[in-house]
Structure formats: structure tokens, C-alpha cells
Amino acid sequence: MARILLLFVIVVAVTGKHHPKFPKSDESDPLKKAVACSSEQDQLRNQFIEKSRCGEPKEVFVDLKHTSSYLQVVPSSVWVKRCVGLCNFGPPGSQCIAIKTRMEAIPVCIVFVELIPIQRYLFVLDISLTQLFICSRLRNPIVRVYNLKTEKETCTTYEVEVHESCGCCTTSPRDCVAPRVFNPRKCSCQCPNMDDRRKCLSKRNQNMRWNRSKCECEKRRTFWS
């Protein structure tokens, strides 16, 4: 009986360690013991909030991916300025988005990801070993192909979007359904053909109306009683 009781106590102690009713240890909980705020803590917190606020574009790591699974872009990632940050002082539901953008061409080279023996590539591409170069040591060897005429690497560019100015908006480009497009200056979805809209509004006397969802001029419906 004593052995059974001892075994029961051990089982309860082991299982009770992870029971949801038991308090978690400090190692698993990032929040430490709550204490009264001091002026120094308020100052440090405000500094972190200011750094995290949506303002000037910040550099983030962006992946450069090829559409083909057996081709890889080198470099595979670059630092690019993007709009990220908090919009705590904006309207509810605001997001940090780009108000002004531009496209930048990143010089890259495209390489084959060696998933089969090099001899198979030699057979398919009909080139010799002297025209191949190991780009880097990864889990899967990468083969860089040279231009046969110039005996140099064939390079290209990869266009990435760079954000130049940011703002807090309740509407994002993902919220705009075609044909409407996002207007970052007004933080709203609008029709791109504004000239057609002006022409349509001038035809109000002809029983015409502008459909903001379809971005087209249509005849006004008449409901007879």
C-alpha cells in the first residue's frame, strides 16, 4: 500500500508540473513581475514607441525569389527600405503603408540549383566543365553558367519596390478590388479613369450615372410605381 501511495505522489508531481492550473515559470513567460511604473521606465517605453512608430521608411530584409524552383537568384536577399511601424495615434485600424514608392534594379545573377548530377546538366546544356563555376557551398551545389561568347557571367537585374514615404491609413492596397486602385495620398480606393468620370457626371441630364464600383458610366435605372 505504501508503494502504491508513493507511486501516486510521484505521478501527480510529474504531471502537475505542466498542469494549466499551476503557475508558469519565469522562463516561459516574457512578462516579469508587475511593479509600479517609474519616470525612468516611462521614458524608456516612450523611446521604444517612438522608434517603432510609422514614419521614415526602415530597412527590412527582402527575399529575391525566382519563379522557377530549380533557379536561384544571387544574392537571395537584400536590404530594402519599406514602410513598417505602429499607427497607435492614427484612426482605429490604421496600417503603416507607402505613400510614395519607386522601383530599384538590383544587379543579380541567376544560377541553377543542382538537384541532379552535374553530368546530367552537361548533357542537357551541352557545355563543358570549363564553363561552369561553383557559386557557393550550400546543401545543394549551385552551378553558375558563363556566356560562351564573352566567357563572362551572364547577369541581370531584379526589380524591387522601395518605399520613399509612409503614412497611416485605414485602407490598404489589398482592400481595393479591380478596376479600382489604391490612392495613397487620399488613403482610399478610387477609379483610375477620372476623365471618364467627369464626362459621365456632365451627362446627368441624360439620365446617366457613374458607377464607383465598376468605374464606368451607365444608364440610371428607373423604377415605375
Image: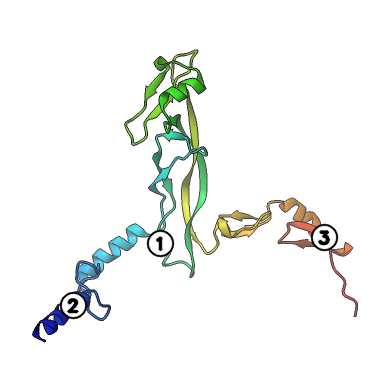
Label 3 sits on what residue type? Answer: Glu
Q: Earlier in the sequence, mark 1 or mark 2?
A: 2
Q: Residue furthest front?
A: 1
Residue 88, picture quadrant: bottom left
* Circle nearer the viewer, 2 or 3: 2
Say above or below: 145 vs 90. above
Helix, strand or loop for disc 1:
loop
Q: Position of residue 173 (x, y in %)?
A: 56, 56
Rendered residue at 58%/60% (across/down): 175
| Location of the C terminus (image quadrant) | bottom right
Label 2 sits on what residue type? Answer: Val
Q: Earlier in the sequence, mark 2 or mark 3?
A: 2
| Location of the N terminus (image quadrant) | bottom left
Q: Residue furthest right?
A: 224
* Circle nearer the viewer, 1 or 2: 2
Q: Position of residue 148 (x, y in %)?
A: 48, 15
Rendered residue at 80%/54% (across/down): 199
Say above or below: 202 vs 14. above
Say above or below: 186 vs 163. below
Please give the residue where the numbered disc 2 appears in the rendered image: 11
Please give the residue where the numbered disc 3 appears in the rendered image: 218
Please give the residue where the numbered disc 1 appears in the rendered image: 86
